[in-house]
Amino acid sequence: MSLLSVRSLRVTYGGIEAVRGIDLDVAEGELVALIGANGAGKTTTLKALSGMVRPAGGRVTYKGIDVTGMASHHLIRQGIALVPEGRGVFARLTVEENLAMGAYTRNDPPGVSADLDRVFELFPRLSERRAQVAGTLSGGEQQMLAIGRAMMSRPRLMLLDEPSMGLAPLMVQKIFEVIQSISAQGVTILLVEQNALLALEAANRGYVMESGAITMEDAASALLESPQVREAYLGQ
Amino acid sequence: MDIFLQQIINGLTLGSVYAIVALGYTMVYGIVQLINFAHGEVVMVGAMVALWVITALAGSGTTLPPLVIVLIGTLCAIPACMAVGYAMERIAYRPLRNAPRLAPLITAIGISIILQHLAMLIWSRNPLAFPQIISNPVFHLGGATISGVQIAIISLSLLMMAALTLLVYRTKLGVAMRATSENPEIAGLMGIDVNRVISITFVIGAALAAVAGVMVGTYYGIAHYTMGALLGMKAFSAAVLGGIGNLAGAMLGGMLLGVVEALGTGYIGNLTDLCHVSWISSDLAERCAVDGHVILFGSNYQDVFAFVVLILVLVFRPSGLLGERVSDRA
Ligand SMILES: Nc1ncnc2c1ncn2[C@@H]1O[C@H](COP(=O)(O)OP(=O)(O)OP(=O)(O)O)[C@@H](O)[C@H]1O
Ligand SMILES: [Mg+2]
């Protein structure tokens, strides 16, 4: 049975239908990629799954319970963490305060401080800048912080929205290594990416989204071989 | 008597009250970008409730020491004001959270009128004597005097400001408040119940306002259902002076405004005494010879200074003294 199961999910903004009845499944421990062109509705999908927008229709089941329309501050307590598009770090809070906010829902100080060490180990740059306000970090450092912050909640399902956006190739590589290591630790991941090649290489399975609908769904390796995907998203 | 030193002392006393009230404006603005024009009325409610309780206790022939009576009055005013602050946000502002900004602003003015008139119905339209039951020794300081009440107002305000700063910068709730003020959507993702944090912000501001109400009541010995309006406007000016949304700014702005107002009031009569320039007309010289002074603006102009400061800030430095823009690279 899948950890996350989405059925006929619809999201509208005013009159515009940004997500038009999609189905999507993510099994426990899987790393699933969701790729698609600009404006396809990927961010909107993640926003609906993390409670930032209310779906206009459909059903979201997580851990077997109906979480459709649940507010984000409840969903995080269920173990769903989002690394939002554009990072969304708190620019006026320090690195350490940002990470503390990631652990806001937790009441086990020893566990939190162990996870803080883990994040600093993974991202030594953040450790050096722990007392600095996040607004002064570079784009790549902010992305590390956004991922570290999501890790601090010890999520069972992590949603990532274009973590490689605007980063230099070396940093992109680093971020993908981190995502794979988080996945290797058993965290289930739904990854939205423009960089379809990297995303599909990292993922087990993938979905292709176009104009608010899912148009393809397959094993990641199969999508990498698919002529349509190669032409539209891999530039080959 | 040393007018300068005396007015500094008076100004710091007044400024402490402005600062405490300004904090309420600035905290609420910081978190929901709303100017809660009804905040001054919360101060009035605090003064009135305290007046009620203190009058009742003092008249009951109790053997409680006066200081304890005032303390009890304050401890009754605080929850009353917290309830008003909570209800205000819950009933009036929350439904308008996503409305155009003019809507909550007009609502704020409406609430302020409602609160004033409710207070008028409960506590009458007449100025009430605020019981001044605690002994108020006067100390000499240089060429000036400072009273026990003044010392209490200044030190209690400093204490509350320190406590608030610790809360906002050193506790998890405080970090959550700052996170919410920066980006409520992302704060929600962290698990912060944004509505709750906003409620808490209103309630803390109201608690500070309650204490401020007791302070002004005790200081001036009078309370009136309209007393919150002018005080509120001045505290709002102080918050703008410091940089609205900025805690340290509200504290600095409040203190500065108090001092400016006191010094202005202390010197305006002398500064606008036309007899300094009696040579410009023989009529004037004659009057000066008779009266000694022809004062253009007397100390009854005291309420003007806050608004002159407000206008100057809005013209020359709209972001206020400490209101700097932090660049968002995100
Ligand atoms: N807040 C909003 N109000 C109105 N329309 C919106 C809003 N957010 C997104 N949309 C519209 O919904 C559609 C889907 O947007 P979404 O951000 O989900 O796309 P995306 O797949 O994440 O694109 P990108 O790859 O550029 O990030 C777009 O047409 C967009 O214009
Ligand atoms: Mg997007």
Image: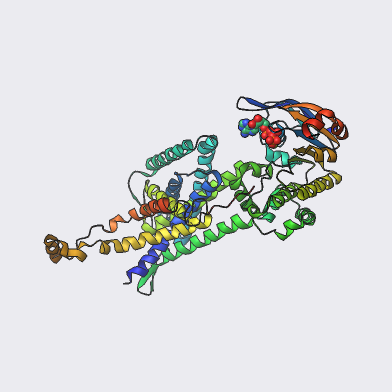
Look at the image and tell me whether residue B53 can be seen.
Answer: no
Report the residue that reaches farthest toward the front.
Answer: A236
> Is B66 drawn above or below residue B314 in the view shown?
below
Residue B90 x/y as whole percent: 54, 39
State the residue in front, A29 or B192.
A29
Residue A40 image-quadrant placement: top right
User: Split into 4 quadrants, where in the image is the N terminus of chain B?
Assistant: bottom left
Residue A122 x/y as whole percent: 79, 54
| Residue that appears at 40% across and 51% down | B315
Residue B303 x/y as whole percent: 34, 54
Look at the image and tell me whether residue B194 can be seen.
Answer: yes
In the image: residue B325, left or right of residue A91: left
| Residue that appears at 75% across and 40% down | A78
Residue B155 x/y as whole percent: 48, 64
Query: Number of labelled discs?
Result: 0
State the residue in front, A47 or A201.
A201
State the residue in front, B172 or B132.
B172
> Is A192 drawn above or below residue A136 in the view shown?
above
| Residue that appears at 63% across and 51% down | A91
> Is B52 drawn above or below residue B259 in the view shown?
above
In the image: residue B196, left or right of residue B96: right
Q: Quadrant of ligand 1?
A: top right
Report the residue that reaches farthest toward the bottom.
Answer: B142
Residue B113 image-quadrant placement: top left
